[in-house]
Image: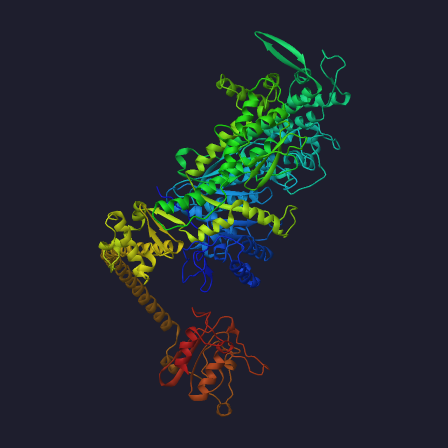
Amino acid sequence: MVVTVKSMSSADGGRVRPGFRHGGGTVKGFVHKDQFPRPNLNDSLEGEIQAFLTDEDQLHTYDDLTKVNPVTPTTVLKCLQARYNARVFYTHAGCTLVALNPFQPIPDLYSVDVMKEYHCAPQPQELKPHIFIVAEEAYRNVQGQLEPVNQSLVVSGESGAGKTWTSRCLMKYYATVAASSSVVKSQDIVGRIERRVLDSNPIMEAFGNACTLRNNNSSRFGKYIQLQLDRSQLLVGASVQTYLLEKTRVACQPANERNFHIYYQMIKGATDEQRKDWKMPCGQHFVWLPNAEKTVEEDCFHETVEAMVHLGINAERQREIFRILAGILQLGNVNFSPSTDESQPCNLEEQSKDFLQRAAELFSIPTEELQLALRVRTLKAGKQSVLKPCSQTECSMRRDCLAKVIYAQLFEWLVAFINNSICADKSMWCNFIGILDVYGFECFQLNNLEQLCINYANEKLQQHFVAHYLRAQQEEYVSEGLQWSFVKYQDNQSCLDLIEGSTVSVFSLLNEESRLNRASDCKMFRVRLEKELCDNVNISWDKFSKVPHFTVAHYAGKVNYQIQGMVEKNKDPVPPELNSLLQKSDNSLLHQIFTDKETDNMTSKGLSKVTVVSKFKNSLESLMKILHTTTPHYTRCIKPNHDCKPLTFKKEEVIMQLEACGIVETIHISAAGFPIRIPFTSFLQRYGLIAKYSNFQSESDCANLESDNQGLQQEVEKVLRVVLQNQDVDLSHCLDSDKHNSWVHCGRTKVFLTQSMLDLLEDQRNKILSQCAFVIQCCWLRYQRRRRQARRKSATLIQAAVRSWLVRKQVQRWNRAATVIQDTWRKWKALLKSLAEAELDDAKDLEEENVPELNPVIRERGSVQLSTLQEPVTVRGWPMGLALASAPSITVSLTATGFQKMMSVMASLNLPSRRGEYKVEPNQYTQGLASIRAQPKGSVKLHYQRSPLLYADRQPDLKSEVTGFNEILLEKTL
């Protein structure tokens, strides 16, 4: 089993800057292991304190109080004050985290981005101190599976120091971390579970928290929340264990304090319809709701109802819950007046009858039976029952008892319902992280049994811290052979012996007094306490006080406890008439609650009556057993001022809290000791691979070790030497146990490490694991590449064969298509040629025709004379457009060269004039040009009639290019 106490300081928390002095010795690189001097009043120490405090501008930079030198309450206080004024509220103190309450919202200090930043950081300790560092360290301990795997986050401090808020932030952090690391398959489940876990907070705070003089959201019960994680460290469920609800607050509220939040939420957030159903008209005054005009942040009824819906409490069940709560309020307005006849029950005041009737209707029980149960008690004499009227005081006590028992049972039912809603099956989770949030240390003007139990719980937690860290670590150093000088600390074991001692203690005497079948006498009980416990220095009495009391010197200060009513509260009697009446209720929830309670009472029948302190002590003992089997992480919440003023730091109040919780002693031991302790076997299981896979050979031989340190210790020494030699560190400086400033010490059964040495080991281990992973990756990649190449070669052959077949098929289709195209083209070409030969007149035929000779004058002047007969006309040297103007169908043959030839062709193509003055269009314009042929000897032959060239382009100059047949023909012609 590995007992590990990780340091929650920053990565260099175990180091100090060169030039600073710890315990009078200069430290080079790492913490000096000399014993720190105890705070004293000599001149040298005061000189060091003054020298340290002169540089006030740098005090806020000390993120770990182990860097402070010298370590005294004054220097620690000054550093915390400087950081608080700089709005830095978290500071490391060795193995603990100190949290100062700012009493105001701090933007972006707890946002999701900040959570992810600390979760994704390789070394969260290197970031600024934060509550998320503690949470992430516990989470990584679970991931690392170092024994003990289960973790506990202990949040302690005075009432109003910020414990509830800190616990809420821790739950949000784990819900976010689990959700962000979930896989797609379980994302919806994780989202639903983490939402339910977070929704349990508003309900439990509404029913279990109240506004007190010292805190607007004071927890009036203790709770231990187990966040259940599966093997992948995903949040799969949670469970809640509660301790000692202050149910007396329901019927009795201290001066200037309020009842539980849920009542004020109902008054301020209910609709008119709900008020009518609860029989709570607007403006009604309730005796048990003092300071109703005060508004706090927690008065949010909508948030509570929404959380109930998310947890699966349906509307009908909510209605039953709120009707029960409204009935308790109506019960508080019922007052009794003494009867003139002692044989008759007390009378109800006239106005109280209406309140009693409303309460009975809300509880769904008969009004007459409720009135009878409050005013008359049943005494059993053998098999007979005798009814005896109650006095006015007894009636009031029975009324208060009814309200307290209903509220307590309703609270227990809510906790059970929440656990059924969010708790996972045992087979689904393997580890847990526990968050402990208990009421803080309290000291009021009037303190009774509730404050005694609350302060007793804080004493137990302080003792757990002392036993686990301050005392156990130092004793282990000595037993393992380390040279260690004990640091004195305040041990509160004598105070615990006074309260819970096995032989004679306050609890044992209180239980004996409670089991006596007679009325308690507070003065006699005080005399007995003084007689039996006079030898204990932690208890005292004020002999001149008229009020019976006793004073207990707790670790956080002295508290006066009033004896009046303490015995009765310890008995916590519930008249059987009230239980029987509530079992008959038509309210299904109320009936279920008290029926189950009666079943539990039947199973425990024959056992002695369990008192309040006995029940609380047993539940606290079970909590301590859980804490002892987990790795604890401590967070000390400090209240800067008792008035809850924002950013106000009062030295006197802070120094008392620092001294009470042992912060200074913790800093001494953390700075001088070894925070990490690992057994040899566990050390070799985790770090043995460093020597196995390292090629570096140790310069020294194991023969130098002592004769009795062989086997495991030799293997451990070998691993340590390999690591230190790889870092070029002087082995004698770090491994020699006789040197106080060594980084590591091998005890008889364990290895003691500083945080710096642990970082070296983890770094070397990660390097070797990375090398091994690299070799595995290389082999795997080589195998994959060879398999990929073989598959690629096979695929290439297959593809080549398929492609060759496809190409052959394609070429065959192309050959067949080409043959068809060629045949068709040849046929079309022959057809065109035959058509052209049939349509065009041969030049020889024109020569043989009898063409009338032209007048010489006309021939000389270049004019033309056209016949009106529809016959072919031969025109030489004249624009074709004029020749064709009056002929409907004409075949023209001309012989021309050069410019005359070009002009003739242009005219035949019906080109408009450039100037736009005239335009020659023959009658055959719509018919189109039939054909143009370049004849031998430079002549041009045109056939102007209907033909397949009807749509040929006859105006090429109107476009940028000449295309089609005209392009070909004009090139040949011109």
Decide which of 151, 97 is in the foreground and name it. Answer: 97
Is residue 234 in view? no
Q: Which image quarter is the N terminus in?
A: top left
Where's residue 380, x and y in %? 59, 10
Is residue 834 in view? yes
Task: Left or right? Give the position of 475 relative to 826.
Answer: right
Q: In the rendered image, which quarter is residue 579 located in?
A: top right
Q: Residue at x 30, y 60 (%)?
A: 725
Where's residue 511, x and y in %? 54, 24
Decide which of 250, 565 is in the foreground and name it. Answer: 565
Q: Is residue 445 above or below residue 769?
A: above
Q: In the rendered image, which quarter is residue 291 located in?
A: top right
Decide which of 178, 571 is in the foreground and name it. Answer: 571
Where's residue 894, x and y in %? 43, 83
Where's residue 919, x and y in %? 56, 79
Decide which of 492, 427 is in the foreground and name it. Answer: 492
